[in-house]
Amino acid sequence: MKRFKALDVFRGLTICLMIIVNTPGDWNFTFSPLLHANWHGFTPTDLVFPSFLFAVGNAFAFVKTRWADKPLSEVFQKIIKRTLIIFLLGYLMYWFPFVSWTDSGDLALVPFSETRILGVLQRIAICYFIGATMIYFLTNRQLIIASAIILLGYWGLLSAFGDYTLEGNLVRTLDRLILGDSHLYGGDGIPFDPEGLLSTLPAICNVIAGYLVGKFVIQGGISYEKLAKMLMIATGLLAVAYFWDLSFPFNKKLWTSSFVILTIGLDIMALSILIYAIEFLKKPINFNFFEVFGKNSLFIYLLSEYLAITLLFVRVDENQSLYNYIYEKGFSWFGPYYGSFVFAMAFMMFCWLIGLWLDKKKIYIKV
């Protein structure tokens, strides 16, 4: 089946932005659009992760045609294997390098009891598995109905058993009960995981939406009529999202149902613009830069994370991290905000160059 360049560019664009957002030179000086909303609200950066899940769904539009010729056992063996590999890679990423610096400057092993179990790749793995299962067994109409039930049910659960605050939400309550405080993210000042177990449920709908849109795009070719329909659907979803926000606010860390509808609408709009720019302009815009990221997306994302963790761990020049040392010596002269941003861009370009080398060598690493 023919691949659509716009889908590959869309996936690559999300990886590019994920790297820029995750690796500023100084986290105290980051441009506000590159920050996540503190709690309720929405910033452009909040769109990046759901867009990657949307791109995962796009890929299913191609994969499902190959499932028809294979027995159920073989299909699910591959799905389960990929799920476990992605989850394990994400878990090890947060544990890596398995030791930490103590206040006295010594190294100490990080015990399993203090490791974070959930995270970005772990959420991708869970959404991949449940999304694949639903896509395999359900029709398009059933997928839409199931997604509506998930989003409405999630709204009902959070409303009935807690509130929408950081301290009192049901997502945190369940994670603390099932996983324990020591296995949760603590970056918000208290044990709370923005990739929690319960909040992963509505994120599955981003994958399902990506599949449905991807299937719509690739079947029968692209046309102005299709683009018009996509934009109409996107506009309708945005209207629903903003109406829902009045009672169930946009919140990435809780992955609220209104947030899901908002991000799906924006992703459909973004994909429509890319399709128009690539397929319909007389002089198509060259998006090859982002295709490099798209061809080895998960590997490049993992590379960026492990590289950043290593640079933060290695100590140089009076116990300063190598990450901070490179920023101060090479980029801080740009000024606090611009220096932090240029560092992020340089880090992203380094990862891109590795991706380019892999592409030139025709090496495509599939997890």
Image (spheres, rainbow, N blue to C red):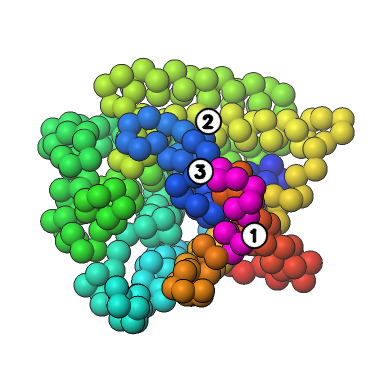
Q: Magenta span has 336?
A: yes
| Residue 8 visible, this angle | no
The mark nearer the N terminus, 1 or 2, is 2
- For the point 41% across and 55% down, the residue is 120
Give residue 347's position: percent from left, percent from top. Answer: 62, 58
* Secondary structure under the numbered disc 1 in the rendered image: helix
The mark nearer the N terminus, 1 or 3, is 3
Residue depth check, mark 1 versus mark 2: number of the one nearer the observer: 1
Give residue 294's position: percent from left, percent from top. Answer: 65, 54
Residue depth check, mark 1 versus mark 3: number of the one nearer the observer: 1
- For the point 79% across and 30% down, the residue is 280
The magenta segment is 326-337
- For the point 26% across and 21% down, the residue is 247
Pointer 3 residue:
30
**341 with respect to 223 (left or right):** left
Question: Dot 1: within a 10 Å radius of its alpha carbon, few (fewer than 14), some, or many (20 or more) residues?
Answer: few
